[in-house]
Image: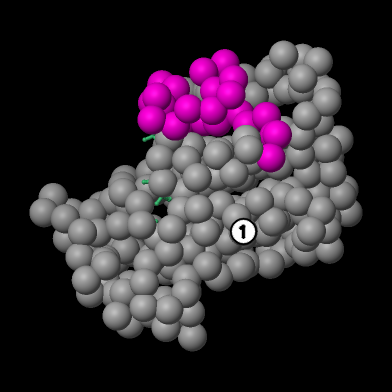
Amino acid sequence: MESLANSRRILVLTGASRGIGHATVKRFSSAGWRVITCSRHAFPEGCPWEAGPEDHLQVDLSDAGDAERGVGELKRRLAGGPLHALVNNAGISPKGANGERLSSLNTDLDLWLQVFRVNFFAPIALARGLFEELRRGKGSVVNVTSIVGGRVHPFAGAAYATSKAALAGLTREMAADFGPHGIRVNAIAPGEIKTAILSPDTERLLAPTIPMRRLGTPEEVAKTIYFLCSDQSSYVTGSEIHINGGQHV
Ligand SMILES: NC(=O)c1ccc[n+]([C@@H]2O[C@H](COP(=O)([O-])OP(=O)(O)OC[C@H]3O[C@@H](n4cnc5c(N)ncnc54)[C@H](OP(=O)(O)O)[C@@H]3O)[C@@H](O)[C@H]2O)c1
């Protein structure tokens, strides 16, 4: 595996077990990348890819100590070699007991902190922890933000929205700090993408309001992530790309 690490491009991807992460692992694997995935559950049988079980790391990014352990384990697996891309995709968007939106008035502060740990602190912990490997690989970091980082949304809650707004700000800061070291840092902001994170009524209520009149697919998001990790975007850094069928206009 070490000789492979030296010859193939390598991606570390959080939240690969389903949705956008699942499509991303398939997109990069089909282009020949080695993909090291991280999520809470064991290797997801529903998302098979070459060398998947060996390259999957079980880590709970809502636990700062476990995230730190995860960084150590990733460094061990990279064995001092280059890392070409880090995609911070894992994210949580908690709802109330009956599926209702949690607002700034009723979000428990411990829950708010948990959302920030996964959606905001894990991305910077991973990027800083893997800085040397990214520098060696002239790497690209992609932070997965959201359209709700910039507007109030009918289903996504206040903790989620503020964590994504903070992640967009972090992307800007990181682009400035990491750029001189040859590392690009961008964000992608999906709108309504058909995955488990969406509320059940999204398609019926929101699709008619989107200029393209449909939800997006995880594959459409994965294509943009791939672009940002390829030479096609070699002078793009500090950007946030909207992937939302025109929902932001
Ligand atoms: N779908 C959309 O419409 C949409 C819109 C805007 C932004 N986004 C963003 O896109 C990203 C992916 O969303 P998605 O819709 O694909 O979500 P999803 O289907 O709910 O998948 C979330 C992924 O994150 C992992 N994860 C969750 N909590 C974790 C934790 N504590 N530690 C480690 N991994 C964890 C999950 O794996 P485990 O359960 O195994 O941990 C899973 O692989 C998220 O950042 C989300 O905020 C999505």
Name, please, the residue furthest toward the left. 98
- The quadrant in which the N terminus is found is top right
In this orientation, does residue 137 appear?
yes
The magenta segment? 31-54
User: In terms of secondary structure, what is the magenta stretch mainly?
Assistant: loop
Q: Nearer the viewer, residue 78 or 18?
A: 18
- Disc 1 crowd rating (10 Å Cα; few below 14, some 14-19, many 20+) is some
Task: Name the residue located 61 percent from the left edge and 29 percent from the top edge.
Answer: 36
Is residue 68 visible in the rendered structure shown here? no
Q: Is residue 40 left or right of residue 170?
A: left
Residue beneath disc 1: 224
Ligand 1 under 8 Å from disc 1 Cβ: no
- Residue 41: say if magenta: yes
Q: Picture coordinates of residue 220 (x, y %)?
A: 52, 59
* Helix, strand or loop status at disc 1: helix
Going 56% across and 52% down the picture, which residue do you hit?
Answer: 222
Residue 145: give x, y in percent of width and height: 52, 59
